[in-house]
Image: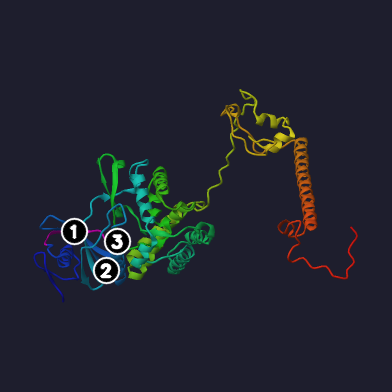
Amino acid sequence: MVTFTAYRGSVSPESRSPAFLAALASAAVPGLEPVSARAVHPGRAAEFDSAIVIDDQDRSWFIRCPRTPAAGARLESAASLVTLLARRLPFQVPVPKGFVAVPDGRAAVYPLLPGRPVAFAGLPSGPGLAAELGRTIAAIHNVDRGVYEEAGVPSYDADAYRTRRLSDLDRAAATGHVPSALLSRWEAALDDVTLWRFAPSPVHGGLTRSQVLAVFDSDEDAGSGHVRAVVGWEDARVADPAEDFAAVVTQASPESVESVLEAYANSRIERPDPHLRRRALLASELALLGDLLGAVTLGAPDRVRHVADRLTELSRHVGPDDFKAPAPVSVTPKEVPVPRDVAGPASATSAAATGALDDTAAMAGPGGSADTDQLALPTDDDTVAMDPRTMFDATEEIPPEQLHAVREAHAAREAALAADEGEADEGEADEGEADEREAVHDGPDAGEAGADEPADDAPAEDEGATPEPS
């Protein structure tokens, strides 16, 4: 039998007493000399034995010792993750300072983090601690998914996550301890695919009151709290962000939940999906399935009966419409009175509204000239003071006679331009033909050979040729 000679004597590993855990802490962290130790409640899953240890330098330590190999693997995964998260989150996380081997893995020793657990049931609404909690959850969900992948924690997309929930429900139903009303309720929610359209995010995985630590400016004002640390990262994964709201939506008041969600939405990089709260309520109920399956796996009949009683109690209190989408809100636009008469000189807009624009003004456009079709620079006379109360309807219908006049004017202008271009082309063609005739009459070298001497390359007349009459 292995014994540890620390904390004033030897203890056996089977005892799992605070003294034994203090001895483990002394073996894990060099220089840690335990002076006192007290046990910590193992939690509903009962996966770890824990204790707070005070050393001879008045330093406080926290030790967790796994009870099963599965718990030991989860502790190792969490230790790898928090080492990466410590530099990326605005609050503290428990980074181990030492490990010691135990039969079911390794026990980890952490410096005790500051703060007290936050009681969600007494969480005040408003911009205080509730908003701080919302920003804390948003900071976790904003972490780069690559950090979680580097730590090797599980990752699920929306469809795989829903399938996993269905598998847990089937396994729990096979135990015979889940009321049929809850089975039907949860199956209907899991079959509603519209409920499961979400973007997977890095999540804590089990955010409860005991895992959020806060310090308070005043012991009499719960709203003066500030989140200083988040512990218990064994269930961290990339999954549904609603998981981290399961305890909040069931324990906090509706006003406090609104404050948490508002601060969360304002701090998220990605916009939260509209079904977040409904899935959070479902996650809080399905957490009992995890407790049931864990108790069955451990072979603890007392715990199985306890969880079964909680499931029966839950079936008596749930409502039939908890997971239904809220009815759409009908919004009626408010009528805004628009003054018809506008003080000040008449503008081009008023003229257009009455059909008084002539064809050339319509073709020139605002601020343009009909003669040059170029945009004219505005002058002081062109500037008209606009009444800010005036509203113009951009979809107002143009009078048919005005539209017809504008189209005819545009067609006439295009025809005139085409005619001008045709006359110009004919004039250029006449000038070109005249130049060609003159060049043929003078000969190609007439200007260079001179009038008295024949050109060198001119052909000689035949001696027997009859000269043309002059």
Look at label 1 and name its amino acid.
Trp
Residue 410 in the image: state x and y as whole percent: 75, 41
Look at label 3 and name its amino acid.
Val
Name the residue nearer the viewer: 92 or 381.
Answer: 381
Residue 454 location, quadrant: bottom right
Q: Is residue 284 left or right of residue 217?
A: right
* Residue density around tag 2, few if under 14, some if 14–19, many if 20 or more, within 10 Å: some
The reply to whether the magenta stretch includes residue 3 is no
Residue 403 in the image: state x and y as whole percent: 75, 38
Mark on residue 94? none
Mark on residue 61? 1
Q: Choose the circle earlier in sequence order: 3 or 1.
A: 1
Residue 308 appears in view: no
Which colouring convention does the figure follow? rainbow
Q: Is residue 256 left or right of residue 341?
A: left
Q: Choose the circle earlier in sequence order: 1 or 2.
A: 1
- What residue span does the magenta drawing correspond to? 33-45
Residue beneath disc 2: 67
* Residue density around tag 1, few if under 14, some if 14–19, many if 20 or more, within 10 Å: many
Q: Is residue 244 left or right of residue 420?
A: left
Residue beneath disc 3: 82
Vertical placement of residue 343 versus 429, above or below:
above
Q: Residue at x 37, y 57 (%)?
A: 143
The reply to whether the magenta stretch includes residue 39 is yes
| Marks 1, 2: nearer the viewer | 1
**Circle 2 SS class:** loop
Query: Alpha-carbon distance for marks 1 and 2?
Result: 20 Å
Q: Residue at x 28, y 62 (%)?
A: 83
Q: Choose the circle earlier in sequence order: 3 or 2.
A: 2
Residue 208 location, quadrant: bottom left
**Circle 1 SS class:** strand
